[in-house]
Image (tube, rainbow, N blue to C red):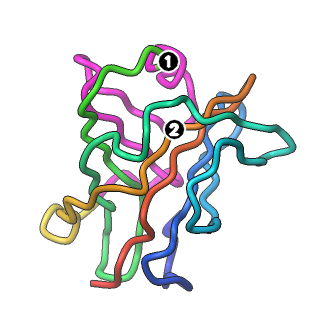
Amino acid sequence: MAFGTLPYKRKRVLIALSDKAPPELCSIEDLVASKVQTNGEELVDAGLGDWLGFYDWLRDTPKSIIGIRLWLDQDLKCIVLIRTCVNAVVAEDGRNLTIFLGSDRKFAPSLSDDQDFGANQLFIGKRVFAFTFNAPVDR
């Protein structure tokens, strides 16, 4: 599922992960929050701040987002559980996380080198994890 043309510029987005359904991407308020609601569940900020590492939006064309790759600056204790989420791929060493929004896995490396950072929080619920990011910019 390619995300297509993006309706927002540099706002914050949230990607919710679970072991039951593909990742869900939605726009959210720009404010840093301690709790968010998604998929009928309340998620709480993991307390890691708004910097988890650099991230790249994965594109197959200049305007089509198929996922995101997060280069983690710190170990996440919940990474073992995140490995079980649909379309979440965790590197063997646990230092990078790739989230595909659908079944497409082919992206263009030259279009997927944002090295964006900030606005990046982890929220944890009973059955859902969510990450926030700055919305991608058009290429």
Question: Which of 109/69 is in front?
Answer: 69
Question: Looking at the image, which residue is at 35% across and 79% down?
Answer: 137
Residue 101 against residue 18 in the figure, above or below: below
**Earlier along the polypeptide chain: callout 2 or callout 1?**
1
Q: Specify the quadrant of the image occupied by residue 66.
A: bottom left
Extreme-right residue of the structure: 40
Give coordinates of residue 71: x percent, y percent: 24, 40
Image height of 36 relative to 119, above or below: above
Image quadrant containing the N terminus? bottom right
Q: Nearer the viewer, residue 15 or 120?
A: 120
Look at the numbered disc 2 and give the secondary structure of its residue: strand
**85 part of magenta stretch:** yes
Left or right position of 139 against 79: left
What x and y, as percent, mark residue 22? 63, 45
The amino acid marked with disc number 1 is Cys
* Helix, strand or loop under label 1: loop
Residue at the disc numbered 1: 78
The magenta segment: 79-106
Q: Which mark is residue 90?
A: none
Mark 2 touches mark 1? (CB < 8 Å)? yes
How many marks overall?
Answer: 2
